Image (tube, rainbow, N blue to C red):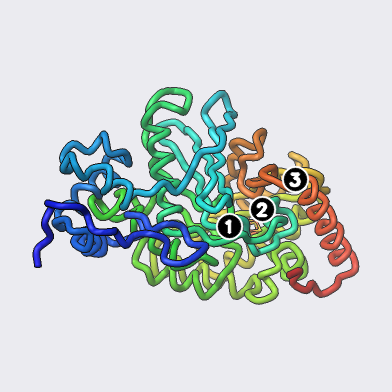
Amino acid sequence: MPAVESGPMPVFTMKPASKGKPPTHLADLTLDARKKAMKEAGLPAFRADQLSRHYFERHEATADAMSDLPAGKREEIVDSFLPPLLTKVRDLRADQGKTIKSLWRMFDGAMVETVLMRYPGRATLCISSQAGCGMACPFCATGQGGLTRNLSTGEIVEQVRMGMVAAESGDLAGGPTHVSNIVFMGMGEPLANWRQVQAALHRMIEPSPSGLGISARGVTVSTVGMVPLIDKLADEGLPVTLAVSLHAPDDGLRDPLIPLNSRFNVKKLLDSARRYFEKTGRRVSIEYALIKDMNDHQWRAQLLADELNARGRGWVHVNPIPLNPTPGSIWTASLPETQQVFVDTLEASGIPTTIRDTRGSDIDGACGQLAAEVKGNSARAQKAAAAAERVMAAINNGEEHEADE
Ligand code: SF4
């Protein structure tokens, strides 16, 4: 039976499917599923197209902007299909207003952060895939708090839309601009929330009315090394950039730095990164936080270059990152001269290398610092310091690291 627009709208089904889950949102659904949901709500399927164009093309989510929807049902449609998922708690600004870190509260009180950064000719948004993170990397503030929960597809996409609205309305110093780059380098390990991240990638990249129409080349997914899911991402047919947070080229150091390394070691990880390049043609980024006297040795730069070159030429790029120390932690940034030797060693071996920008580090907005001050700051700082000491002891004693679950 065709949907009709007269009479009261039936009780709409896009509500929390079960306890503890955020309300279902337009961005959770494929375009076909939106049409089906619209029909179930007693509305013609083409309303899904109209609503989707408002949301994905014009980044609108309020009824008063949607004059093409029937006046008597506008509010009801928006309330049902676009329930608020993120409430802004506060903005922090840095870099003369060219960086904005935003803290968002979700329906259950869980918090996430985004960082919007202006560069010449573009804006980049760093988003979160999980509230907290279960990977327990000892140098990372987010990792000290553990995983609160996975974000829904809608919650991930809504971070992007909100960032786009902020950029387009001129929130960043320098006037209105557009978000062209999205990086999954906020809270969480994106590939540990694979299904929601996978759907969110489609919603970001597919053109309107299906999605936001962002170029896949402008989207970066980072991982600490979930090898089977790197292969899944490669199979997805979306040529996004893969960023591997490596931080050490040898298992002896990477085991204590990244607990997941005990399951997927450096060789397995670099092999999967190479497979990603072969499947997608996209050059892989290797992220390497330089930590004073821990992983910044010249011999480690040479080992990294050798491991990368052993898998071919021209497939990879290294981004050394000056470390942002977490509050209370003993992790310290490398000296500038040590950093330079590290970069020179990689470049002398033919590895393209660029020191990564650490925008927002003065507001705890650089990756690896998100959530440092949301709550339990001092407890997290103490945990970070204790974890750092355990890592140092493991390295000094040459012990085998065991995952610190
Ligand atoms: S570094 Fe990344 S993967 Fe590791 S704990 Fe922090 S957010 Fe999680």
Classify 216 as above or below 273: above
- The kind of residue tagged 1 is Gly
**Does the residue at mark 1 contact the one at mark 2 (Cβ under 8 Å)?**
yes
Number of marks in the rendered image:
3
Q: Residue flagged by tag 2: what amino acid is it?
A: Thr
Q: Which of marks 2 and 3 is nearer the N terminus?
A: 2
Which quadrant is the N terminus positioned in? bottom left
Residue 356 at x, y percent in the picture: 59, 44
**Spatial separation of the CA atoms under disc 1 and disc 2:** 8 Å
Q: Name the residue under label 2.
A: 142
**What's the amino acid at mark 3?**
Asn
Task: Give the residue at x 50% y 71%.
Answer: 229
Q: Which of marks 1 and 3 is nearer the N terminus?
A: 1
Is disc 3's CB within 8 Å of ligand 1?
Answer: no
Q: Position of residue 340 (x, y in %)?
A: 70, 43
Task: Return the residue at label 1.
Answer: 188
Q: In this view, does 201 lie to the left or right of 325?
A: left
Give the alpha-carbon distance from disc 1 to disc 3, as whole Å.
Answer: 18 Å
Question: Image point 18% across, 58% down: which residue?
Answer: 42
Q: Which of 31 and 212 is in front in this view?
A: 31
Above or below, 121 relative to 310: above
The residue lying toward the viewer, choosing from 40 and 270, is: 40
Q: Can residue 314 be seen?
A: no
Q: What residue is rendered at 66% in x and 70% in y?
A: 260
